[in-house]
Image (spheres, grey):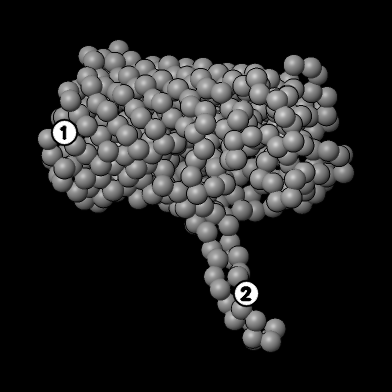
């Protein structure tokens, strides 16, 4: 593969005096770039998070907030993501890219012999988590301007999905707004047409559609790309597109979107007992997003804005409520809103850039702040008791990079909720890396 103009989020010092910064690479590029010049490439990223939440974690804290105002704080230690990249260059423009992700240390189940229960064999669920094949594709490069990729691919809608590696955001956890309303990381099986033309990079995708039965109030379409089956139903298809523009060194603007129907995309492909009543219900999902990155003059600034729409929400809520009460149904019963929104911006300055010795050693210390607003439930009528989904979040903290591939993070954040809900402050510490070993 030819070397791309999209390099990793690293600032290079040239001759000890001139500093040149580059906008970050996309998630798919992170897998592909390092295959260049070598047949096999092995890498990955991971993060550890230690948090103290100074608010109640009770399940009813939003339904009766006055009862949980003075609840004790709670702590969480987690490994949100641990990822392995495996790439291979077959030659003549054919490459393989894979990303295997362990979320929250994966799943933990085992068969055990319980001696105190008459030697009974039991399946023990010892911890939660997920193991996912987030990318698995074969790419054919015809030219720099034309590539075709087939397999399991990233759906690059929004800043977080296109650039979700932990060195691409300042906070310990992924940006909360997009992580709430959109699948994160959004990946699905399909076909991608992409390339680079001058200062532009484009991508157009056709993927398996979303499933409205997994949408809900608190996360909007976040769970809609998943499937409880061994396969992903594709009775409905979705289209995604993204274009990035690089006007100058260290600056990038992005525009992305998604369109597709989400009803009748389950297994079996019917709505049992409803006859023809919902045959014309489509549940059209339309999303638009703009984002940008500035990485220059010792500053990193990132911003995004997303707005989404779902059609036929009244019919979908009726269907979901009925199907959720079926025995062992995976359908989520909570209502969904017609729209959702997420806006966020963060900015950090590298104070080590002013210290010659640390600058020469490529050490960095970013002092940053972040603002975001999001709402996962905007119905056509008044939402009444569900106004807790309307969130303003503030965060500030530090990112220390002893090496370009490692970040030690600390942030204090708070969710500012409308009355009568209680605000939700937290203190978070983390360490993250991204790099290639081979």
Instruction: Calculate the distance from the C-alpha at mark 1 to the C-alpha at mark 2.
Output: 50 Å
The residue to which callout 2 is attached is: 122
Q: Inspect this view and state whether residue 351 appears.
A: no
Report the residue at 16% width, 33% height from top.
93
Decide: few, some or many residues near mark 1? Use Cα within 10 Å; few <14, some 14-19, many ≥20.
some
Task: Specify whether 376 is left or right of 152.
Answer: right
Decide: few, some or many residues near mark 2? Use Cα within 10 Å; few <14, some 14-19, many ≥20.
few
- Looking at the rendering, which quadrant does residue 426 occupy? top right
Closer to us: 82 or 422: 82
Report the residue at 12% width, 35% height from top.
92
Indicate the position of residue 344 as horizontal and vertical percent values.
54, 24
Closer to us: 325 or 222: 325
Q: Is residue 39 above or below residue 319?
A: below
Q: Helix, strand or loop at disc 1? A: loop
Q: Inspect this view and state whether residue 117 appears.
A: yes
Report the residue at 58% width, 57% height from top.
128
Indicate the position of residue 222 as horizontal and vertical percent values.
58, 34
- Residue 135 got which mark? none
Report the residue at 41% width, 47% height from top.
133
Task: Specify whether 62 is left or right of 158.
Answer: right
- Residue 93 got which mark? 1
Q: Helix, strand or loop at disc 2? A: strand
Task: Specify whether 66 is left or right of 180.
Answer: right
**Earlier sequence position, callout 1 versus callout 2:** 1
């Amino acid at each position: 593969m030819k070397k791309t103009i999209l390099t990793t989020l690293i600032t290079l010092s040239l001759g000890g005096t001139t500093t040149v910064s580059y906008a970050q690479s996309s998630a798919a590029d992170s897998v592909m770039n390092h295959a260049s010049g070598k047949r096999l490439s092995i890498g990955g990223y991971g993060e550890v998070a230690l948090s103290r939440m100074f608010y109640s974690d009770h399940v009813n804290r939003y339904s009766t907030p006055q009862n949980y105002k003075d609840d004790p704080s709670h702590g969480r230690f987690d490994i949100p993501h641990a990822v392995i990249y495996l790439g291979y260059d077959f030659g003549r423009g054919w490459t393989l890219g894979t990303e295997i992700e362990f979320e929250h240390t994966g799943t933990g189940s085992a068969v055990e012999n319980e001696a105190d229960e008459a030697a009974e064999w039991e399946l023990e669920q010892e911890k939660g988590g997920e193991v996912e094949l987030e990318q698995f594709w074969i790419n054919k490069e015809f030219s720099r301007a034309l590539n075709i990729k087939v397999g399991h691919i990233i759906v690059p809608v929004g800043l977080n999905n296109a650039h979700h590696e932990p060195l691409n955001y300042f906070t310990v956890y992924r940006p909360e707004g997009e992580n709430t309303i959109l699948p994160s990381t959004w990946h699905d099986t399909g076909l991608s047409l992409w390339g680079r033309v001058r200062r532009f990079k484009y991508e157009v995708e056709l993927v398996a559609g979303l499933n409205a039965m997994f949408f809900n109030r608190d996360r909007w379409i976040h769970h809609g790309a998943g499937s409880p089956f061994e396969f992903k139903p594709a009775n409905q298809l979705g289209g995604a597109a993204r274009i990035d523009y690089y006007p100058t060194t260290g600056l990038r603007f992005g525009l992305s979107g998604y369109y597709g129907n989400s009803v009748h995309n389950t297994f079996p492909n019917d709505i049992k007992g409803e006859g023809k009543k919902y045959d014309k219900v489509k549940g059209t999902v339309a999303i638009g997003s703009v984002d940008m990155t500035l990485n220059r003059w010792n500053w990193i600034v990132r911003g995004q804005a997303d707005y989404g729409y779902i059609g036929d929400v009244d019919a979908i809520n009726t269907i979901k409520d009925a199907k959720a009460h079926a025995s062992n149904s995976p359908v989520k019963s909570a209502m969904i809103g017609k729209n959702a929104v997420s806006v966020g911006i963060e900015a950090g300055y590298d104070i080590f850039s002013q210290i010659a010795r640390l600058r020469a050693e490529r050490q960095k210390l970013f002092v940053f702040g972040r603002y975001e607003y999001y709402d996962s439930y905007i119905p056509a009528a008044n939402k009444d008791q569900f106004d807790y989904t309307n969130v303003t979040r503030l965060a500030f903290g530090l990112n220390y990079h002893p090496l370009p591939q490692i970040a030690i993070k600390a942030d204090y954040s708070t969710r500012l909720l409308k009355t009568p809900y209680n605000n939700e402050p937290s203190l978070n510490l983390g360490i993250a890396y991204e790099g290639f070993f081979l």
